[in-house]
Amino acid sequence: MTIQIKEVNCTTREETIRNANDAEIAQMAKDKAEADAKKAEAEAKATARQALLDKLGITADEAKLLLGGN
Amino acid sequence: MTVGRLPNIEGGIQPTLLTTTGDIMYASSANNPARLGIGSAGQVLTVASGVPSWATASSGGMTLISTTTISNAEILLSSIPQTYNNLFIVIRDYLPTTDAEPLRLRFNDDSTANRHAARTALTTALTFNATSVAITTSQDDTLADGIYTIAIIDYANTTTRKFCIVDGMSFESDGTTFQGVSGRGAYNQTDAISSLRFFNNSSVPKSGTILLYGVK
């Protein structure tokens, strides 16, 4: 799939639509990889947190109450 | 009768006086026509030393710099005029291609690691650990009904790091409940902001409108 970039020159107000260049395509891949890694990390933390709650036999709300959170 | 250019005679105005689209003709003195070349985008017509001229609005108000329709593409706003005090951005009815994708903002198209950061909680320490800032919620991909505003204060200075304030909301696909976001983003460089890239991490933004205003 060709990724397009709409570029607006805010001084001249000229608007152009072009295909993403190699550097932009590489950056998109990098952005996606980093986002996927952060998502996986968050999911792993959530899983670990739930496992701990299960081990303690309390709910998330009860854990907040215990720790003084709101 | 032949219609055409007047011969170069006293009293006639030569059409060649106006050389460029948007030029305006005025009298530089009595009986003396002169050309005022087209100004730059956003300039206003004013009077200086008794004759008309184009100038950047000197005080007050918001000037619409650009209106950009999102249509299955990343958006790059470049060559942002450096003549305003602040930038104000309105994003209407944004939809991602992939469900739950927030729209992201990258200052100066700078993808160097650890130069961007975002926080929604006021009390949490800000760590620069990103290459962009999320400026919307995890947006539903079916119902385009939301509005977000972003203020970038003192964007043109070259001595302080840059910050943006984000506020907005959008309806969920059920059309009755909504998500809201109120947060702030930061860019730990002192460069003036001359470009803004709007994008998604997993795909391209599908639709919406981005309005960029300059604020005096």
Image (cartoon, grey):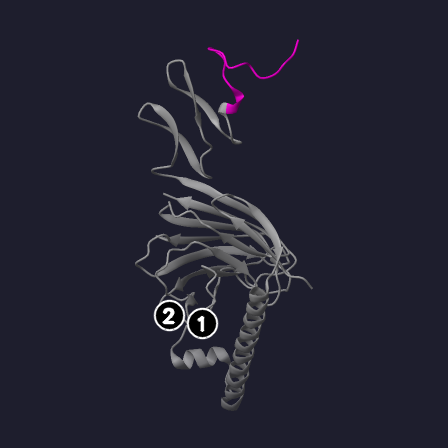
Amino acid type shown at disc 2: Leu
Q: Residue furthest top?
A: B1
Give the extent of the magenta segment. Answer: B1-16
Residue at the image point whose x is 43% and y is 49% from the top: B88
Label 2 Cα neighbours within 10 Å, binned few <14 / some 14-19 / many ≥20: some
N-term mark: 1 or 2 = 1
Q: Secondary structure at mark 2?
A: loop
Residue bearing the label numbered 1: B113
Residue bearing the label numbered 2: B126
Up-down relation of residue A50 to residue A32 (above or below) = below
Camera-nearest residue between B26 and B160: B26
Quadrant for residue B120, please give it: bottom left
Up-down relation of residue B50 to residue B169 (above or below) = above
Amino acid type shown at disc 1: Ala
Q: Is residue B204 visible?
A: yes
Camera-nearest residue between A25 and B185: A25
Residue A45 belongs to the span the image colors magenta: no
